[in-house]
Image (tube, grey):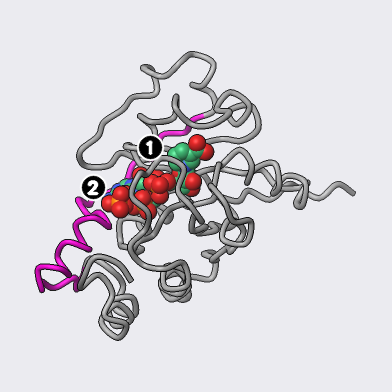
């Protein structure tokens, strides 16, 4: 008897720090695309950001672990942190497909990343290999119709309540001595305070 392929969504990100926008996007994707699991995968070196993460990778990783712990279908994956180097999604997908042949992969991205897709490394190969789940995000808007015709079958648009939250804004609030309560899970807020993250320029 043939076993049905699992549907796994990957929420890739710098997670510097992880916040409620990431968690809500993953939840919306999980529900709408009937995923079996969502893996939160922190990047080692993000491919498109000129500025490197402010918090060290162990801090970013532990905050992701804390944030996903309450949800049984959310998991934290160290795949890209263990691979090292620049975290190109095409490299990650090839590795995952080799290791887990009976999985259909869905890469979950916010609107800013949908707009940036033409610049992704090996994007045509990636588009043929996996599906993307795109969410709208305040500050960027996109439509499936505006995408190249060959991509339109590969990108699933999913709605979510719009949360104008970004890691950049959270880091800035910390530097300004302002609260980040209700922008990140309580456990992450406590962790950020305990390790005095984002109070100065890097840690
Ligand atoms: N508020 C949000 N709503 C929807 N998607 C989001 C939101 N915040 C982040 N994302 C998506 O989550 C993924 C990872 O984002 P990332 O870790 O870079 O967070 P960020 O808030 O954009 O960080 P930074 O402000 O440091 O650039 C990206 O695909 C991004 O588009
Ligand atoms: O592979 C690429 O060229 C590429 C370019 C930009 C972003 N990504 C991936 O998109 C996800 C979100 O990126 P970021 O930097 O906004 O956290 C993360 O998994 C990145 O590795 C991937």
- The residue at 52%/57% (across/down) is 41
What is the secondary structure assignment of the residue under circle 2? Answer: loop
Q: Name the image quarter holding residue 175.
A: bottom left
The residue identified by callout 1 is 113
- In screen coordinates, is 1 left or right of 16? right
Q: Which residues are the magenta region?
A: 155-182
x then y, percent, for residue 183: 23, 65
- The residue at 90%/49% (across/down) is 1
What is the secondary structure assignment of the residue under circle 1? Answer: helix
Closer to the camera, 89 or 197? 197
Q: Residues within 10 Å of mark 1 (few under 14, many from 20)?
A: some
- The residue at 53%/47% (across/down) is 86
Q: Name the image quarter holding residue 127.
A: top right
- In screen coordinates, is 152 left or right of 19? right
Look at the numbered disc 2 and say if its residue's Cβ is closer than 8 Å to ligand 1.
yes
Q: Name the image quarter holding residue 37.
A: bottom right
Q: Residues within 10 Å of mark 2 (few under 14, many from 20)?
A: few
In the rendered image, residue 141 lying in the magenta stretch gets the answer no
Closer to the camera, 112 or 35? 112
The residue identified by callout 2 is 162
- In screen coordinates, is 150 left or right of 201? right
> Of callouts 1 and 2, which one flags the residue occurring earlier in the amino acid sequence?
1
Closer to the camera, 198 or 157? 198
Q: Residue furthest top?
A: 149
- The residue at 69%/41% (across/down) is 94
Q: Is residue 51 visible?
A: yes
Q: Residue 135, relative to residue 71: is it above or below?
A: above
How far is disc 1 from disc 2 in space, using C-alphas? 16 Å
In the rendered image, residue 166 lying in the magenta stretch gets the answer yes
Q: Residue 151, relative to residue 60: is it above or below?
A: above
């Amino acid at each position: 008897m043939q076993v049905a392929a699992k549907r796994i969504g990957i929420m890739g990100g710098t997670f510097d720090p992880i916040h409620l926008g990431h968690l809500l996007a993953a939840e919306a994707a999980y529900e709408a695309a009937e995923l079996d699991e969502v893996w939160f995968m922190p990047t080692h070196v993000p491919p498109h950001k000129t500025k490197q993460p402010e918090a060290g990778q162990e801090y970013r990783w532990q905050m992701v672990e804390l944030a996903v712990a309450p949800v049984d279908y959310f998991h934290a994956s160290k795949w890209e942190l263990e691979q090292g180097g620049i975290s190109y999604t095409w490299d990650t997908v090839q590795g995952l497909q080799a290791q887990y042949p009976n999985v259909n992969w869905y890469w979950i991205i916010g609107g800013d990343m949908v707009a940036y897709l033409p610049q992704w490394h090996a994007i045509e190969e990636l588009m043929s290999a996996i599906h993307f789940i795109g969410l709208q995000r305040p500050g960027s808007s996109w439509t499936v119709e505006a995408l190249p015709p060959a991509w339109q079958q590969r990108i699933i648009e999913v709605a979510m309540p719009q949360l104008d939250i970004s890691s950049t804004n959270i880091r800035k609030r910390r530097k300004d001595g302002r609260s980040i309560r209700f922008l990140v899970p309580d456990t992450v807020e406590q962790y950020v305070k305990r390790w005095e993250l984002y109070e100065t320029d890097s840690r």
